[in-house]
Amino acid sequence: MQLNCLGFPRIGRRRELKFALEKYWRGESTQTQLLAQAATLRQRHWQWQAEAGVEQVVVGDFAFYDQVLTLSATLNAIPARHRGDGPIDLDTLFRVARGRAPTGQDAPASEMTKYFNTNYHYLVPELSAGQVFSIAYEQLFDEVAEAKALGYQPKPALLGPVSYLYLSKTVGQDFDKLSLLPNLLKTYTDILERFSALGVTWVQLEEPILALELTKEWQDAITDAYEAVKTAKVKILLTSYYGSIAHHQGLVSRLPVAGLHLDLVTAPEQLPLFANALGQDQILSLGVVNGRNVWAAEVDEIAQRIGAIARDLGSRLWIGTSCSLLHSPVDLDAETKLAPALRQQLAFAKQKLDELAKVRLLLQDGDSKAAMEIIAQCTARREAKALAADNRVIARVKALTQNDYQRRSDFSVRQAVQQRKYRLPLLPTTTIGSFPQTPAIRGLRSRWRKGELNDTQYTEQLQQVTRDTINCQLKLGIDVLVHGEAERNDMVEYFGEKLEGVGFTLQGWVQSYGSRCVKPPLIYGDVSRPKAMTVDWAVFAQSLTDKPVKGMLTGPVTILHWSFAREDISRDTIATQLALAIRDEVVDLQNAGIGIIQIDEPAFREGLPLKQSDWQAYLDWAVKAFKLSAAGVVDETQIHTHMCYSEFNDTIAAIAAMDADVITIETSRSRMELLNAFEDFAYPNEIGPGVYDIHSPNIPTVAAMVQLIEKAAQKIPPRQLWVNPDCGLKTRTWAEVEPALKNMVEASRELRRRLA
């Protein structure tokens, strides 16, 4: 009965990879030094797996930016604008991700979007008609050899060929992506043969699209793909995650693979279907430890649920994580200040490996003293969790009525009132919220947390940063300002630290993309807001100018999705509790004189179930949560929201139902393609499509932004348009931000002159 880890976070327990990457990008270290740090991390993580009893350490989960991008390089699928004349190397990958040509000039970065319904972003492969695939990058094979040399048996993890095509985009002439499958399969076969030659026994081929509702063409592609690779001299573990694949049971059970992995955390009900159809020689890997959350697994209950099938299958059963542990923080042992009551509820990636071993122990030796101790720990943890209820919050949720979810007037009425109050020009300019978090700001925060600065000193210095940020925007001529959020560490963590029922960690980092890491709060109890969270900073910023300064909040749906949320009550109940807390803040901001308030919901679409037939139930409660957070204000108060990296076509009606006065969205990398949804739907409210990509260091020209605004104006009436970047500016430098915003303002003014 083997233990099966589907993947391990690569950033390191103290974000060692992040810092090594950024040092290399700044030219402060060599590639040799970067590679050495990466090897140290891989070897540590393999050692942890082996110590926990994992027989085959996972390889291929490590990436210097994104594992899908690494696969694209392996397959020789690199855009021409980033490629260069030489072989594909690590710098090639960085050019794709960060927007550079081989000459050092700007070249648009490849599009980045969410990986299914997670907060992890992948680089979208760009494929053209007649694309020729071949093995062109050696990282995967080098790491297999590295693991073998250290005495480990490696199990490569690789996105499957059909899911790779599904997640890609076509460029150039229009064509069917599936026409590329035969050539792609030849290269996958070559990869599998290379693995076999290196001594690999099992390969984890991941087909997460099986959790989607696939057309017949894509279902047939799955069949064709696994028929084509069945002759490989390695055993294939067909791997699914993030949802049930029961609707494809007949298809999957017919595939000629040596094993199947099921995610039983999201879909425990699918187990009997596949267990009954399992071939006599096939293994079944059960994902029973949650790879996407931090709560300690109820290993005694898991063992009880799968006990019967464990007895039936014996060594043909593997005990695994539900998905890659990429979505979990690395090591709970790095936490030194957690309250004991909260700590006992948690398990990070390293501890989840031990949980796999505990499940196996309970299955194989359930009457032992060690097993009894494990069961006692689980019982004590559940009893402690039951004491966390806040009856005041529970009663407030029960008392809500339909009126609590509605603005006082329709948008057309509110729009007229707001136009008279703010007198904004055509194509008003604004930014999304954050301004650069410089080393000086991070240093201030660090010194304050260490006690080297008292609260007064810290506040005074951040107030000066806020003054500078306001003055910069005034000098640039931006119409609706922001205070810059210098006091905030992260858009979710900042609020999590100020809410009851929410905890936070010191080193609970997870990767969002590239070197960007976030530290999600832990929603362990019923949520409430004991006091105002942002009002003082908003009022201070507004006192510096007569122009409107937006109050900046993170919305309830995003706080939920970007936190590690408790699992003992429904997610819609948690969202409602969060919405009430944000509503209280919105009302306090309005009463303090802040007339424009932005409630960011970048994760709104991220929460969609993978099956479209399940969407409406989610959209109903997600829309209600946002409306509840925003509906306590008068008509004059203008509510903004922001969404990024979302496809809107299928959810546009729900986004309109949120009834925000202004929505800002990411559209620059797609060259305004995402606005097709707003054109076809005739979106009724105002909208700010992002006119430049803040995730790239490139500084956009006036002409480039004028062109994008003109494209937007072809789809949406100019009177409804705002002009803004596509996301916050936190990760950029002032040297990049000021000229970019200057060009953005000039682009807006140029078009105003044309349209006047």
Image (spheres, grey):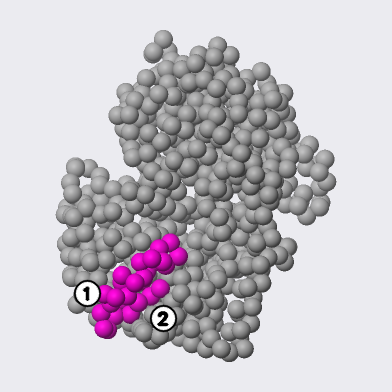
Image spot of residue 304 (x, y percent): 49, 77
- For the residues labelled 2 and 1, the Cα–Cα distance comes to 26 Å
Foreground tag (2 vs 1): 2
- Check the image and report above or below for 235 versus 739: below
320 on left or right of 77: right
The amino acid marked with disc number 1 is Pro
Q: Tell me the residue at 68%/51% (across/down).
A: 390
Residue range in magenta is: 259-286
Frontmost residue, 371 versus 693:
371
Q: Tell me the residue at 50%/53% (across/down).
A: 512
The question of residue 254 being in magenta is answered with no
Badge 2: how crowded within 10 Å, few (<14), some, or many (20+)?
Answer: few
494 on left or right of 722: right
Q: Tell me the residue at 57%/72% (across/down).
A: 351
Frontmost residue, 714 versus 381:
381
Q: Earlier in the sequence, mark 2 or mark 1?
A: 1
Image spot of residue 592 (x, y percent): 71, 26
Q: Which residue is mark 1?
A: 256
Q: Quadrant of residue 435?
A: top right
Image spot of residue 225 (x, y percent): 21, 66
The amino acid marked with disc number 2 is Ala
